[in-house]
Image (cartoon, rainbow, N blue to C red):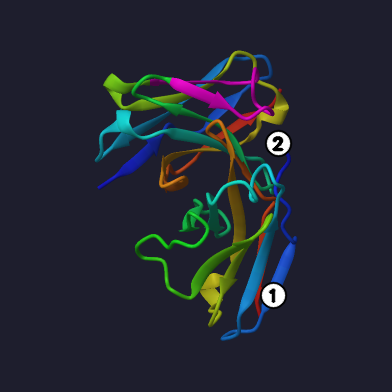
């Protein structure tokens, strides 16, 4: 399985919105509604932000939302805050209890 | 509190064997898959494989099949990741994480593995 494709970096001003894309294939993102997103600050443990494409775990602000269209999933963050600056990874189920991550996107809050 | 606690940092020479651990607490360990994730220095997350401690059903990403062995001892609520012969390219942080709702919701703190001559 190849890694899912994410932009290397995105940026947005404080208070604005950004969207991070995650492009896969008909064998992963397009085949299952099991896309999750993780936030990782430098030197820290990854944190689950979105699961099953668009569900938020308890404690995750509703500024974070997920969606999917065809082979591309997206993570949207509204009302950007400085603490949102981090690396974001998407992850998709590919069948037979195997998953694959995206390459990661560095979000910069200007 | 549900948590995963991993074993401490390891420094190995190339060719040495290694086994790191991940102990779960606060839930029925046998009921949830445990995944292992690699993060090489300055790089992204890579899904390595997963085990269901209840019956030791194990699946590997093709990239890691044959390179590592994932195991578990449900009586100890502990999962393991092991190498028979480490290489410099195994230098990384290794995370274990509990799967639920098709995602990795609970993560261990990570184990740093350094392999150098």
Q: Is residue B57 visible?
A: yes
**Residue A82 screen position, x and y as percent:** 55, 77
Q: Which residue is labeled 2 in the image? A: A1
Residue A48, magenta (yes or no): no
Reading the image, the residue beneath label 1 is: A11
Around disc 2, counting alpha carbons within 10 Å, would you say few (fewer than 14), some (14 to 19), or many (20 or more)?
few
Q: Which residue is most to the bottom?
A: A15
Residue A57 coordinates in the image, percent (x, y):
39, 60
The disc placed on residue B64 is none
| Residue B93 visible in the picture | no
Q: Which residues are magenta?
A: B57-72
Instruction: Please provide percent x and percent y for residue A100.
Output: 63, 42
Task: Determine the secondary structure under disc 2.
Answer: loop
Within the magenta stretch, is there residue B71?
A: yes
Label 1 packing within 10 angstroms: few (<14), some (14-19), many (20+): some
Q: Nearer the viewer, mark 2 or mark 1?
A: 2
Foreground residue, A52 or B54? A52
Along the line of sight, the residue nearer the viewer: B1 or B17: B1
On the image, the x and y values in percent for residue B33 come to 41, 33
> Looking at the image, is B78 positioned above or below residue A102?
above
Left or right? Give the position of A29 relative to A60.
right
Where A101 falls versus B24 (above or below)?
A: below
Quadrant of the rendered image containing residue A90: bottom right
Q: Chain of mark 2?
A: A
What's the residue at 54%, 52% (across, down)? A33
Q: Residue at x 40, y 21 (%)?
A: B72
User: On what subunit does the disc labeled 1 rest?
Assistant: A
The quarter of the displayed image where residue B86 is located: top right
Q: Secondary structure at mark 1?
A: strand
Q: Tell me the CA gap for discs 2 and 1.
A: 29 Å
Depth check, front residue: A25 or A17: A25
């Amino acid at each position: 399985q190849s890694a899912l494709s994410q932009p290397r970096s995105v940026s947005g001003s404080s208070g604005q919105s950004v969207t991070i894309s995650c492009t896969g294939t008909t064998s992963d993102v397009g085949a299952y509604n099991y896309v999750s997103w993780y936030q990782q600050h430098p030197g820290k443990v990854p944190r689950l932000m979105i699961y099953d494409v668009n569900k938020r775990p308890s404690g995750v602000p509703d500024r974070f939302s997920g969606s999917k269209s065809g082979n591309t999933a997206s993570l949207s963050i509204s009302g950007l805050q400085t603490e949102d600056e981090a690396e974001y990874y998407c992850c998709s189920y590919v069948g037979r209890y195997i998953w694959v991550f995206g390459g990661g996107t560095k979000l910069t809050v200007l | 509190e549900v948590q995963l606690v991993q074993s401490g940092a390891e420094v190995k020479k190339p060719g040495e064997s290694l086994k790191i651990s991940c102990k779960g607490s606060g839930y029925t360990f046998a009921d949830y898959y445990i995944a292992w994730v690699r993060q090489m220095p300055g790089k992204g997350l890579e899904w390595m494989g997963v085990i269901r401690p209840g019956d030791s059903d194990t699946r590997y990403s093709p990239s890691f099949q044959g390179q590592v062995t994932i195991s578990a001892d449900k009586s100890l609520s502990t999962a393991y990741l092991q190498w028979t012969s480490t290489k410099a390219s195994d230098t990384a942080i290794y995370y274990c994480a509990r799967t639920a709702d098709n995602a990795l919701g609970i993560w261990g703190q990570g184990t740093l593995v350094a392999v150098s001559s």
